[in-house]
Image (tube, rainbow, N blue to C red):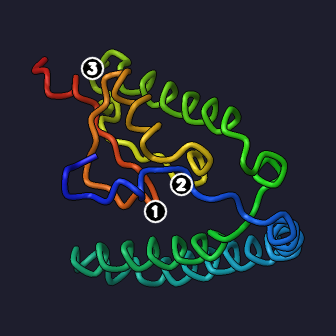
Amino acid sequence: MRAYEDPATWTPEPARPRWQLVLRFVATLVCFPVLCALWLAAAAVLFVVGLFADAIAAVSNRFERGYLRFTDDTLGGIARLGSWFVTWPELRHEGDTEYYRARVDRRVAHWTTLASAPREPKKTRPPVECSIPLRDYRGVGAGYVAEAAGGQGWELRPSDVRKEVRLWWAAASHVD
C-alpha cells in the first residue's frame, strides 16, 4: 500500500446480504447460457468477417492490428457483461475469511509457481506480472493479498483495489 492511498480500500469488502446473493445467483443461472450463446455468435460473426477482411489485411498491416484489437475488445466486452455473476462458492462462502485466505494463498502460489519456473530456450518467458481479481480476495481485503504475495517475492504494482491487485515478480529483474 502506498502512502497516498486510502487504507480503507485495502480492507475486506463488507458481506453482501444473503437475499441479494441468492437473487444474483438465480439471475446468473438464467443469464450465463445467454451470455455464452451471445459470445459464441459474436465470435462466429467476427471469424467470418475476418475471413473476408484477410484480403485487406494481406495489404495493410495496420488494418490487421485494428481488426484484432476490435475483435479482442468486442469479445472481452461481452465477457465483462458477466462481471456481476455470483458463483456457487461465492454464495456459500460469503463472509468466510478462512475460505478467502485459502483462495488468495492458492492463487498467489499458482502465480509464484509459474513465475519461478526456469526459462526454457526457444520458449516464452515465464510471466512476471499478474493480477488477483477482487472476486478472489473479497473476504480478506487487498492488504492480505499484498502481505501473502510479498512473502513469496512479489511486489505491488499500481492497482485499483476495488477491481484487482496487480503484482510484479521481483526476481524478474535478475539478469540471466
Q: Nearer the viewer, mark 3 or mark 2?
A: 2
Q: Which residue is labeled 3 in the image?
A: 121
Q: What residue sits 51% from the left and 52% below the top? A: 133
- Point out the image quarter for the C terminus: top left
Question: What is the number of the mark on residue 7?
Answer: none
- In the image, taking residue 135 as reference, residue 70 lies left or right, namely left
Q: Amino acid at mark 2?
A: Leu
Q: What residue sits 62% from the left and 47% below the top? A: 139
| Above-or-below relation of 127 to 93 | above
Alpha carbon of mark 3 to alpha carbon of mark 1: how far?
38 Å
Q: Nearer the viewer, mark 3 or mark 1?
A: 1
Q: Which residue is labeled 2 in the image?
A: 134
SS of the residue under disc 2? helix
Q: Earlier in the sequence, mark 2 or mark 1?
A: 2
| Above-or-below relation of 160 to 89 | below
Q: What residue sits 42% from the left and 58% below the top? A: 9
**Towards the viewer: 154 or 9:** 9
Alpha carbon of mark 2 to alpha carbon of mark 1: how far?
7 Å
| Above-or-below relation of 106 to 137 | above
Q: Earlier in the sequence, mark 3 or mark 2?
A: 3
SS of the residue under disc 3? loop
